[in-house]
Image (tube, rainbow, N blue to C red):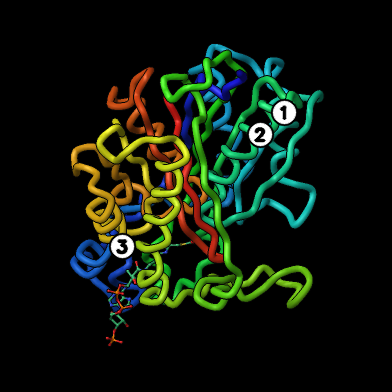
Amino acid sequence: MIRSVVRGTGAALPRRIMKNADFEGMVETSDEWIAQRTGIRQRHIAADDETTASLGEAAARAALADAGLTPDDIDLIVLATSTPNNTFPATAVEIQNRLGMHHGFAFDMQAVCSGFVYAVTTADLYIRGGLARRVLVIGSETFSRILDWNDRSTCVLFGDGAGALVVEAGEGAGTIADRGVLAASLRSDGAHKDKLFVDGGPSTTGTVGHLRMEGREVFKHAVGMITDVIEATFSAAGIAADDLDWFVPHQANKRIIDASAKKLGIAEQKVVVTVNLHGNTSAASVPLALSVAVADGRIKKGDLVLLEAMGGGFTWGAVLVRW
Ligand code: ACO
């Protein structure tokens, strides 16, 4: 059977690093509060010339170089983002053009922080359905542009960045020993919209708007939702937590990551954590974390890797991949 196998990873971060202490003169907060409640120590913030498209392009180029491929080898780009360069056209199409790619097709996918997990699942379906052989799956965000910089309860949490994977069709035997995407479980429930949303949009206010979040409410739902989709993914693949080599969760809050891993019985040393370095980069958080753990040699060919995310909507999901 056809499997969607990861061939390359890449990442891109804005040049500017903003430390927790840099907020101290802007809003009433402290390095200690931010680090204790979230695990975040710093985040990257985009300059005017750094956009979702430019960061996405840079991450895509890095993933292509890692795969030993060129844009000519790609036939689909799926970009997960909630902070596109323009309302339309899709930023994926802009990235396609920046890469000098004038064949194939590209589109954006909007599932907020779960965007990358949705995008990997979508790429897998296009590959297995025969509509694409090689897909660039990108998560790129500039959340700094939609933050209310006077709201201490949200502005300290997010950062900008991009990560990408090249995924290609490969042959598998249909067992969990195969390399590639093995199982996935996706969910959404719009009843939770008011807990995490942006208060603007083309069809309502005609403005971009700012991110609004009831953090405590999101926190309350997060661990249960995350562990539910992971258990569904384990059961679809016929595996248990012990079989995993690496857990690469959405990087929103270290306390949510720790509580989820503990509830699932995933050992601490198997959990990839980058929230301290990047903050919450929404759809970019999982591919950024992946690129760090691949680059430092933790994630290796043949490893069983679980990706997970939860975000606005609510949306949530998990994907199991043999690297
Ligand atoms: N500095 C200092 N104090 C602060 C700050 C800050 N930056 N922000 C809030 N506080 C205050 C609050 O005002 C509150 O004060 P009060 O008790 O006087 O009212 C106090 O700290 C405690 O606030 P809580 O909201 O209860 O703090 P909590 O421990 O819940 O931590 C946090 C807040 C970090 C936001 C947490 O709720 C959280 O991580 N929630 C989940 C967020 C998340 O995971 N989002 C993921 C999806 S994101 C996406 O999809 C785009």
Residue at mark 3: C-beta within 8 A of ligand 1: no
Mark 1 to mark 3 CA distance (whole Å): 48 Å
Report helix, strand or loop for mark 2. Answer: helix
- Identity of the amino acid at label 2? Leu
Q: Quadrant of residue 322?
A: top left
Q: In front here: 225 or 311?
A: 225
Please report the residue visible at 19 percent of the width from the left and 44 percent of the height from the top: 268
Instruction: For the residues labelled 2 and 1, say whether their Cβ atoms are less than 8 Å apart.
Output: yes
- Identity of the amino acid at label 1? Gly
In x, y percent, where is residue 71?
A: 67, 20
Report helix, strand or loop for mark 3. Answer: helix
Q: Which residue is mark 2?
A: 125
Q: Quadrant of the C terminus?
A: top left
Q: Quadrant of the N terminus?
A: top right
> Is 22 on the left or on the right of 167, as rendered?
left
Q: In front here: 85 or 308?
A: 308
Q: Residues within 10 Å of mark 1 (few under 14, many from 20)?
A: few
In x, y percent, where is residue 184?
A: 51, 41
Q: Which residue is mark 3?
A: 22
Q: Residues within 10 Å of mark 3 (few under 14, many from 20)?
A: some
- Identity of the amino acid at label 3? Asp
